[in-house]
Image (spheres, coloured by chain):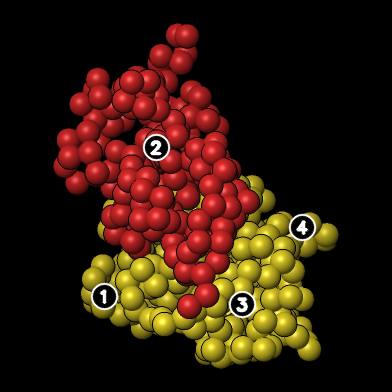
Amino acid sequence: MESITITFKLNGKTTAVAVEPLTSLRSVLREHLHFHATKAGCGQGGCGSCTVLVNGESVLSCLMLAALADGQEVTTLEGIGTPQHMHPLQAAFFDKFAAQCGYCSPGMIMAAKALLDKNPHPTRAEIAEALAGNLCRCTGYVAILDAIEAVVTQMQEA
Amino acid sequence: MSAELFIPRSLDEALGVLQTYGSGLLVMGGGTMMMAHLNEGVFFPKKVMSLARAGLSGIYRNGHTQIGATTSLSKVSQLGDFPILADAAYQIGGPALRNMGTIGGNLYMPQPAGDMAVPLLTYDAHVELASASNSRTIPLEAFLAEPRSRHGTQELLVAIHLPNPTGRTAYLKLGRREANTPSVVTVGARVVLDGQGQVSDVRIALGAAGSIAFRAKSAEAALVGQALNTNSIADAAQLAMEESDPFTDALATAWYRRRMVGVFVKRTLEQLVK
């Protein structure tokens, strides 16, 4: 079994890892590098819980060959905030009770970040469309939309 | 088990890999279908080629429009001059999936996925296929009718070619929910009206209504020379239902799909009346 070495920027830090050729980016993040915020949900592209950013664009890390991350910049939830210094989206999910079990939250937040980085003043409908690929099975979407809308309002006032 | 992964940096390199490994090679565009199969353990390929870095992405205009096979669905969803192609792309998955999925890969998706074929049939698309020794451009209809196993073992889909569109277009997708769902049925239509308001040319394409996306040709033929009105639309919808050969899956029964072909052909054509 030939493994391949891939080198990429993970949350700003150059990272090298040797993996089997067909390993998904999600497996590399969770199993090789122990970045567990990115979740393994359906593995089929249906749930969005594995959403990360590659060069600022949202992708489903389950469906991306890790080999294609070579030379790219990958951002996971761990890269945007810490428990002490939460990203405004994380703080808003906390304040607005937008996480019940929390399994979908990292994917939701990364999808929302991809939206706000491009369009800082989305309408509620645009937020909903940006989350079209992210399923939540317990919290319900209203609190999640409220949280993201609160961040948009904060950004407008700031 | 060992596997070997090829990530060619050019079309020539990709065609070389294909020539060497042929039928033993699994080819991926954006990987959104193949990676799902790999994650599920559906199969365990020995040789895999990703076209993600082969330089096949991009949209070019030179009298007509050429869309590279690995152009993302996100990029396709921004094509203002082909509104129903853009709309159909936007209705696939969510943003992250559309950033990965490619228009070329989508043409290899089995029904009821593969929504791109419907607007592309509506716009009279041709596809360009290349092998190490040859290349050919054929109507999308002929491509869809060829066995899928032929492509990917001998040839790669390189680009999609679109003539400048004429007439009015409409596209509707019925899913089990508003977004991020395979289709129960999809309908694309394009009509060109003459000076008297009669149909001089028309395309009606159906998705998830048979084993491949196809044009409802008897419905098209019935509309030519007619004004678009309640009667002509009802006739076309009925003929489209009769031409359909839908299937039952987890989303819908064949019985339901056939009826929805009628309803959605009617609604799509009604959007073109003015």
Q: Tag 4's secondary structure? A: strand
Q: Tag 1's secondary structure? A: loop
The letter of the yellow chain is B
Residue at horizontal 51 percent and vertical 43 percent from the top: A10
Pointer 2 local density, CA inside 10 Å: few below 14, some 14–19, many at least 20: many
Q: Quadrant of the N terminus of chain B?
A: bottom left
**Residue B140: image tag:** 3
**Residue matched to label 4:** B60
Image-quadrant location for residue B55 = bottom right
Type of the residue with mark 2: Leu
Q: Mark 1 near mark 4, Cβ–Cβ under 8 Å?
A: no
Marks 3 & 2 on one chain: no
On the picture, is B232 further left or further right than B53? left
Q: Tag 2's secondary structure? A: helix
Q: Chain of mark 4?
A: B
Res. B39 in view: yes
The letter of the red chain is A
**Residue matched to label 2:** A77
**Residue B249: image tag:** 1
Task: Measure how far apart labels 2 and 4 are at the Cα level.
Answer: 36 Å
Q: Tag 3's secondary structure? A: helix
